[in-house]
Each structure stands twice: as structure tokens, then as C-alpha cells.
Amino acid sequence: MQIDPQTLVDSINQIWILYAASLVFFMHAGFGMFEVGQYRSKNSSHQLSKNVLTWAAGIIGYFVFGGAVSAIVAGLTGPESLDIAAAFAYQSGSSVDFTYWLFGGTFAMATASIVSGAIGGRSKLSGYVVYALAVGTVVYPVAVGLVWGGGWLAQMGFIDFAGAGVVHLVGGTAAIVAVYIIGPRMDKFDEDGTPNVIRGHSTSLMVLGTLMLAFGWFGFMTGTVGTVFNLAEGGSGVALGGFEMVGRVAMNTALASGAGVVGAALYPIIKGRRPDPDLMSMGMLCGLVCVCAFGHIAGGYGTIVVSVIAGFQAPVIENIQERLGLDDVVLAFPVHGTAGIIGLLAVPFFVPGGFTLAQLGLQALGIVVLGGWAAMSCGLIYGALKLVGMARVDRETEINGLDKHHTDMTNYPEFMGQSSVPAQEARTERIADGGESAQTSDD
Amino acid sequence: MQIDPQTLVDSINQIWILYAASLVFFMHAGFGMFEVGQYRSKNSSHQLSKNVLTWAAGIIGYFVFGGAVSAIVAGLTGPESLDIAAAFAYQSGSSVDFTYWLFGGTFAMATASIVSGAIGGRSKLSGYVVYALAVGTVVYPVAVGLVWGGGWLAQMGFIDFAGAGVVHLVGGTAAIVAVYIIGPRMDKFDEDGTPNVIRGHSTSLMVLGTLMLAFGWFGFMTGTVGTVFNLAEGGSGVALGGFEMVGRVAMNTALASGAGVVGAALYPIIKGRRPDPDLMSMGMLCGLVCVCAFGHIAGGYGTIVVSVIAGFQAPVIENIQERLGLDDVVLAFPVHGTAGIIGLLAVPFFVPGGFTLAQLGLQALGIVVLGGWAAMSCGLIYGALKLVGMARVDRETEINGLDKHHTDMTNYPEFMGQSSVPAQEARTERIADGGESAQTSDD
Amino acid sequence: MQIDPQTLVDSINQIWILYAASLVFFMHAGFGMFEVGQYRSKNSSHQLSKNVLTWAAGIIGYFVFGGAVSAIVAGLTGPESLDIAAAFAYQSGSSVDFTYWLFGGTFAMATASIVSGAIGGRSKLSGYVVYALAVGTVVYPVAVGLVWGGGWLAQMGFIDFAGAGVVHLVGGTAAIVAVYIIGPRMDKFDEDGTPNVIRGHSTSLMVLGTLMLAFGWFGFMTGTVGTVFNLAEGGSGVALGGFEMVGRVAMNTALASGAGVVGAALYPIIKGRRPDPDLMSMGMLCGLVCVCAFGHIAGGYGTIVVSVIAGFQAPVIENIQERLGLDDVVLAFPVHGTAGIIGLLAVPFFVPGGFTLAQLGLQALGIVVLGGWAAMSCGLIYGALKLVGMARVDRETEINGLDKHHTDMTNYPEFMGQSSVPAQEARTERIADGGESAQTSDD
């Protein structure tokens, strides 16, 4: 049969990458529901605006310049010479170029979305959009250039298959830095620092979002193998590409999602309490984050063990964060940051050649570099946003809810009678504003 | 390696089309959430019945005869001779026939679904189902025959890649015609014509539905390339098929979804207000609708510019519609109709040979023919439905909510205490029925 | 062009199976929303915990031993000799092994999930998890071994394409056995046996879940064709595999989902009532269940007829179940059990050789064996769970809602004011506990 090998390779690879990219895009719907469910309804519409805008602003920025940043960074820090024109070639390239650009763009916006959930309920929409744009088009692409683009960390030998560091540690760090700079919601901590539980308004939506994220994760992981086929040497034939590992990656993704739940559930069980679906959902994501580091090389049992640990640490880190006065609403750092670190540190135990301290050192180096880069760049950005007054809403807006003041639209106009506001919150409002808000009608 | 070229072509093409068809099917879940969130809870269960029935009645009708209509119309109006038996061949054809029939069926039901959201809150379920069936199995397939089937408009040179006209303009026109014939919800306009804002009951579900639709849109757009491979001339080999443009299509889909949001957000910003997530969601869909016309030929920057315009015009057209007394609940015409027109008119700026007035004229011709066909046929159908009393529910049913009267089932029996009904609406009820409804218990 | 035939076959098959597996995984999100919407909000968080834990515990168990059970059963009951090592080979196999294991695992957890919805509102979480684990890793794999693995029923000539028996009859039987052993919710039946309607808290989520399930079903059905390509005889080339029937399978899946809705809607219409979206959603699933038996061989019209019957019987069986005092909350047995039986009995009418009583007898045999196996094994398991007190929560927990007592977390803390509890339920509470619960604050 006659077929051009390049045509076969390119077409089959695009089938795979476009399938995967559509699933990663769907993670935005997942992030949206995961986050909105964890907010009080008075702030929930505002939260949804963030999800829509992260994608909207981000994907345009990623076309205009973000998609070129990683190639430029790789050129600056790796063995290949810098070629600015080639870095921007995706803007007017071939079908294959466009397809891989899209896959990269969905990853960039997933990274930016991690921040979105952490800082809601008190952050300004304008500041967030600037930040998300910066994370998606600069902070993340630099990390890509250093690792997957063939830049410095790649040259050193740092291993991060699908972004436990590049995506999740960077996103989680961006989130916790923003949390620190913006400060906690005013009712999160009592004056003596005792943390209050501020329940989200819908566990249903939160769990729905988690399972949608897990669905998208299959595209995130198996798309990262990159190619089904490659051109064989000499170009006269077709050879197996990244697909040689795709089944392992898919299996480990499934096992990690399950084992993370088990890990998170163990914490309350040990404390004599029953696990709730919110925490178990967090655990599922922890497992999925850690497996990003090693899903291409680990065995099933190894994946289960590490993912149980990744799930278990989330409530532990949550407690530490609360003692430090950090109000990370959706546990973005425990889920993406520390779970990502655990996955990266587990890599040396799975590398084909066997464990070496050298590889462990390289993994630690990568963690420090990626986390440090994200912390430094994000600190500068949100610090600047704070200086110009774009970080945080005023006190009254926060009390009355961001939805009403920002857009005059509540999420659920029929269900938000004054009577349905939790007692404690209603009380806070009355004290804070002398009773005026009690007369504000909700529709 | 030995493989029959036809086997390779058919199998790989089916992988692609079945993937795409499943995503387009998923748009029904998207339409469902997008629409239900924009209705008051008293009408929301009724709205969901429409979504389920559109698919159920429609896909059966599309099997029995709808799938043949486009081939018949193409035969009657194009160069190929009419072959009734061939038009119905999909009913007992090959695997490939069945697969492409399914892809067509999911498109037909998407077109019919556009109507569903526009006319809720006062239209009868029975009338809607007849209408949706007619749109999905006659009105839409005729448009397909004229354009994609190779019929008259195709022969003229009209270009509509993925249905900005065939699907969206036809669906949007079918919606606004039905809106005009049925008339507005009784509390939409004051006696002097001032429009009231009637908020939907859940922005969360509305945004969820939008993002689900955008996910499905990737299948809608990239599936429309039609083939991965074709048989090479002579049949002894395999050549690249529609997939030569698939990456461009996917990239432009992503960019359009983002740019539409930006366009819609600009309108309130210019007016000094903050954009809300409902409007931005509408903008995302506007971008996605317009890109259907030219996604296979435009560059990224061109797509962004046109999609910003498509998003921006939605609130403008909304205002015009309201002045005309049209109660298009989900903005079906601005989102699908005028955004589709904008996309079709943008095509001449992207055609490989460069802009010509002749192509612009052809695009205008296509808009007039498709819009005219939809307006005329849909006017006749809903006009007839109105004559036989199947268009609109009675006054009492509308006041009390369609859910209670139609199925004795409210959507959220636990959350619908009398106290949660917005004040204005409760007042309307009391005036309208002398207080009786106040005693109707909700479960 | 040079390519190793095995590489081509394995890679393309994995593309297909991984796509399908991701859709089947997504059914867990569908089951979650389908079920949670049908429960009162006081039990809904608990229900979500089940959905998360079914996957988490199940997929790990399916890796540790569940994936080996079917091969062992096939070895014990079929012509191939038993090979324990080969049965566990998936744990350290090739990419292809891992991929097919994952596809099997998603099916196993779908089977286990069927139970989840039936027994909520009064069953203990711990007992359910043990049960789901047993169903997913033993009860279901045994059925697989008997049929698809090439075991005894396969040798006899029993036909069940995608699991009308193996998945749905087994799952539905497991559900109704558990329902019988646990007993009805305390307020489901009056003392004289009159059944009460206990409405779920969100039709929106229920319908969303249904459409998500239908989306996943496309992967469930078309993935079951198993292969796109096979190695040609002699191994020097590639031949068409199960994909020769994939288009028919996809078409019939679509038609069955529509026809099931029509069938379910006919029942209330005949009774002079209007169909509600809950019942029509059930009908969609009934059609999808029955087509699992014969979707690879039936024509479109045949599929429509059988699916209408499958949809129509659901409310009939519901009535019978209620007379028998069975409280099957989500109609798991009518939807999965009897609809599956109808599909299996329809197979002889579609087999290529024409109807034979012998095939009908074989189908009946398969129904008796699979249903009997599930009933017996599940009866033993839940019987044992009841003996050790893991079956049912205590009376007070059931009255106050499983969410509060199990995890101290309600699903919707803002929307659950005392006033929003339906009158009858609030009354029950007051009588049952002397008013104490009225003072329990909800956050």
C-alpha cells in the first residue's frame, strides 16, 4: 500500500493530540465546578467569571506571545541556539504546529487555573486576570522551556513526565504566593488566629468538578506521551513513538486517582472521624498530581504507594497552612504543590537504572528551581498588583459578597433569601456594617 | 506491510468521526445546563424535558427520514441526479455509512436544540417537540442539502465550513420566529414595553453548560474536516484527506472561544459596568458560532478580530430585540443568528485567493437563502401549531410555573419554599389569582 | 512504506480503547449526578462519598486481583487450560495489556456503581464499600469469565455484546438483592404498605447525570468492538478487526437512547398523565441497557422497537417493586435488570442466521446463570454484612440525614434552612426525636 510515512505519522499523532487537548480543555469546566462549589454562594458568580476569563485572556495571550516563550527560554538555557522566528512559527505554521500549540495552550491555562480557586472571596477580578495571564503566558512557559523544551533542567537530567513540577508545583506555588500577599478572607481567622471552617455552598458541584478533572486528566497524561508514531530513521518508514508507554501512563493515572482518595480518607479515619467527600475529592487530585511525575515509568504498586502518601499529606499541609494564617480556599498548594513535590521525589525510585542519590538530588534541584522561579516571579507580579490597588476588594464588598458589588448579579437569585444565610455569617454582617446589609434585597 | 487501502482509510476516518460525534452528542448535556440555568426554577424541569425529548424524537426521525432529506435536496438542486434509494441507503448500509449518519444526526439535533432555550417559560411541550422534530428532520437537512450536500448554494460558491449558516443561522432564525409567534413571557415586558430582567435560577449551571458546549464544539469543528485520509487516485494508496486543515480548525476554535468572551465583556465595560459571567458565556458561544464559517481558512489574528466583534454584538442585538418586544430567553438569535451572519460575511477576507466583492455577494446570498428558508418554513410550522392551540400554555400555568402544571414535579422540591420566590414574582401571583397559589404547597 | 504490522495494530487499537475507556470512566461523574439528584439533600453528600469510593477502592482491587478473576474463571470453565500467572500478567505487562486492563476496570466499576444509587438514604458507607469492592472485583469478573473470557456460557453460544447481562443484569441484580436485605427507607412505605413518593432534591443534576451517562455509553458500546485492526493471518499484514461493526454499534446506541425515552413517556401518556423528565431519563438508560445485548447485529428499526419496550417496562416494574415493598431508589433493577433481560431475549431476532428457539433458550440460560450467580453471591455478601451490623444506619441517623451524622457536613449549608425542609419530613423529625433535631444548627 502506498502512503507517505510523514502523512501517516502526522495524521495519527494529531488524532491523538487533538483528543487529548479536548479533554484538557474540558478541565476548565472541571476547575469551574470544583471551585465554585467550594465558595459561598455570595462569591460564586464572581468565581465563575474567573474561570471563563482565565481561558479567554489566557489562550489569546498564549497565541500572541506565550507559545514562543518556552522555545526562547530553551534556546537561552539549552544547547540549541536561540531562534526567535522559529519560536513564533506556530502562528503561521502547519496543521501539526497548530495542533501541538493548542495542546500546549490547554496546559498553560490549566496551570493558570490552579491559582483561581485559592484566592477567591476577596481578590479583585482585574488583578486576578492580569495574574492568570502572566502565569499562563510567562511563568509557566519559562518552566516548560527549562524542562520539556530541552533547557537547563532537562540538560541536567531532571525528570518530570507530565508536569508534577512544570504545571502543578508552579501553579500551586503561584497560588500560595498570591494567598500570602492578598491575605485571608476576613472571617477565616478569629483574632487569636483560630481558623474557622467556611463551607462551600455545594458539595455536589465540587465533586462533579473533581470527576470532570479526573476525566480530563486522562487526556493530560496520555497526551503527554506526545506521539503515537515517529518517522523511522532514514524517513522511509514509521516507528513506534511515545505510545510505547501510553498504556502504563493510563493505568497509573487510574490507580493514582483511586489511591489518592484512600490516602486522604486515612487521615480523618486515624483521627477517629469519617472522611467527607470534599477531602476525598482533594485526595483524588493529589494522586493525579503526583503521578504526573512518574506515570511513564512506575509500576502499579509503586504508583499506589506514592499516591496514598500524596493524598494523606493534603490535610496535614492544610493544618500547617492554617497555623501560618494562609487562607488557601481550595487547598491549591497541598493538592498541586506538595503533592507535586512528592511525585518528583518519587521519580528516582522508578527510573529504569535503579535508585541513585544523584537523581534524587536532581529532582530536588528541579523542585527548588521551579518552585523558586514561580515564587519569585509571582511574588513580584502580585506584589506590584497590590501596590497599584488591584489585589483585594474593599471590606464592604467582601462582607456583602463579591457577586453583588461586582456585577449586581447573584448566582442563585431564587434561593438566596436572607433566611438562608448561615447564622454566624449573618451575625458578622450585622456587626460589621451596622445592619445596613440586612436591608439589601437580594434580587 | 500488507493492508487494504480502503480498510485503512475507512477505519481511521471512523475513529475520528466517532470521537467527534460523541463530543457533539455531549452538547445536548451542554445545551441542557446552559438553558436550565437561565430559567426560573418553576419552569426548569419543563425545560429539561425539552432537552431529553429533542434528542429522543429527533434522532428517531432523523433515522426514519431526516437523514435522506439532504441527499434528496442536493439531488433536486445540484448537478447530481436524484436517487431516492441512495438517499435512504444509510438505513441499511456499511459501518462507514452508519458512522457518518450518526455525525449528521448529532448536528441536526444540535440545530433543533437552539430553539429549545429561546421559547421556554410559556411554550407548550407538545408544540415544541413537533417543532424540534421538524427543524431537525426537514428544515436543517434542506439547508445541508443546499450547502454541504452539493446542492444549489454549494454550486454557486457559498462557503460555510462547519455551519455558521447551515446550523446556527438556521437554528437561530427558527428560534426567533418561534419567539415572535409565541409572544413574550407575561412578566417580561411592562405595559409600556419596558423590559424586565428575569434572572435564571443558577449561573453555575449556565456556565457549566457553556463550557460543556465549548468542549463539544471541538468535536463539532474538527469533525467537520470529514476525513483523516482519502483513497489516493487510482485506489492503490492512501492520501491525506480533510485532516490537512484540522490543526488550524482546532486552533481557531480555541481562539474564537476566548475572543468572543473578550468581545462580550467590552460592551458593559464601555458602558461603565462590570461584565457578568452570563454575558461572557454568551460571548464564548458567539465566537464559537462565527468561527464555524471560516475556521478552516482564517489565521489566528483574523479569527480573534472577527470573534471579538461577534461577542460584542450580542448585547447590542439583545437590546434591539427587547425594543421589538421579542423575549428570546437565552439570546438564541444574537448568539446563533447574527454571530453566524458575521462569520459568514467574514469568509471573503480569508479565502486563499484574496477578498472579492463577488464572494461577499455569494455569502450574502447564502445568508438570505438560509435565513429566508428557515424563517418561512418555521413560520408556517409554528403558525400552524398556534392555530391548533399547541403553541402556548394558559395564563395560570405560566404564572404558577410550567413544572407544576405539566408534570406535578418541581425541580428542587426542598429548596422552593414560598419565601424563596423573588418578591416581585410572588406579588404578581397574588394579584393574578387572588392569592390561591399562595396556598399551593410545593411538594 | 515500512512499518511493523504489530506496531500499527497495537497503536491504533490503543488509540481507540483509551478513548473509549476515558468515556466509560466519565460515567462515574454521570452516575454521581444521576444518583445525587434523586436523593434528598440531607443524604446527598453521603451519596457522593459512595461514588468517589466505588472508583477508589474498586480500581485498586481490580489491579490487585480483580483483573485476574475473569481469566481464572474462563480457564476453569472453558476449553483453555487454567494459567494463574497469565491471568495476573496485566500487572507487569506491555502497554497493550495495561490499556485493555484499564478498559476492563472501568467496566467493572460501572457495574459496581449500579448498586450505589439503589440503596442510599439508609445504608452504611462501610458496608457499601465492601459490597462495591466485591461486586467489582469478584461478582462481575466471574460473569466476564463465563461470557467474554470464553468460559462456559460463551462455549454454549450465549450472546451478550456489551454487557446487557454481564454488566447490567449482574449490577441490577446486585442492587435489588441489596435493597431487599437492607429494607426500605423508613418513610418510603406507610404502615399499610402504601408507597410514598420521596422526591430527589435536584432534577437538574439527575438529568445532567443521565446525559453524561449517555455520552459515556458511546465509549462503552463502541469500545466493546475491541479492536480496530487485527494482524492478518500469517502476521505479515493488517486486517480489519472489530471495527467492521463499529458504525452499526454507534448508530444503534444513539437510536436506543432516543427510543427508550419514547417508551418510558408512553406509560404516563397512556395513563392520562404527562411524562416527567425523571422518568424519561430512566427510559433513556433503559434503551441504552437493552441495546448492549444486540447493538452489533440489529438494524435501526429493530433497535427502536426493542428499546421502546425496554423504556416502557421501567414504570411497570417500578410499580411491582413497590407492591413488593422494595425501595429501589433510582430504579436500578428496572433500568439495568429487566431492560437487560429484554435486550438479551431480543438477540435471537437479530442473529444473522435467523431466529431459532435454540438461541432463545441459550439466552434464557444466560439470564438465569448470570442473574442467579449475582443473586446468590450478592445475597451471601450483604447477608454477611447485615449479620455484622454493616448494612444499615440507625433510626436517628436516617431521620436526621446521613450527611450530618456521618461526616457532619451537609451538601448545601446555605440552602438548608429549617424552612426549606418539606413539611412532611419536618413533621416526622419532630415526632421522632421530640424536637431536638430542630435545634441542631446546620453549619
Image (spheres, coloured by chain):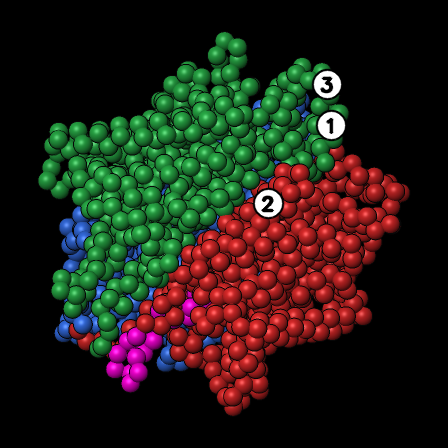
Chain colours: A blue, B green, C red
- Quadrant of the drawing holding the C terminus of chain C: top right
**In the rendered image, which quarter is residue A275 located in?**
bottom right
**In magenta stretch: residue C231:** yes
- Host chain of mark 1: B
**Residue shown at the point (30%, 27%) measured from the top left:** B372
Asked if the residues shown at circle 1 and circle 2 are in contact, with their CB atoms under 8 angstroms apart, the answer is no
Q: Nearer the viewer, mark 2 or mark 3?
A: 2
Q: Which residue is mark 1?
A: B440
Give the residues drawn in magenta, as a range: C223-239
Mark-to-mark CA distance, 3 and 1: 10 Å
Q: Give amino acid for label 1.
A: Thr
Q: Position of residue B402 (x, y in %)?
A: 60, 30
Q: Position of residue C55 (x, y in %)?
A: 57, 63
In this rendering, position of residue C47 left or right of residue A298: right
Above or below — where is C320 with respect to B79? below
Above or below — where is C279 with respect to B308? below
- Host chain of mark 3: B
10 Å crowding of disc 1: few (<14), some (14-19), many (20+): few
**In magenta stretch: residue A30:** no
Residue B251 appears in the rendering: no
**In the rendered image, which quarter is residue B156 located in?**
top left
- Circle 1 SS class: loop
Mark-to-mark CA distance, 2 and 3: 34 Å
- Host chain of mark 2: C
10 Å crowding of disc 2: few (<14), some (14-19), many (20+): many
- Quadrant of the drawing holding the N terminus of chain C: bottom left
Q: Position of residue B181 (x, y in %)?
A: 45, 22
Q: Which residue is mark 3?
A: B435
Depth check, front residue: C348 or A298: C348
**Residue shown at the point (41%, 33%) measured from the top left:** B282
Disc assigned to residue C265: 2
Mark-to-mark CA distance, 1 and 2: 26 Å
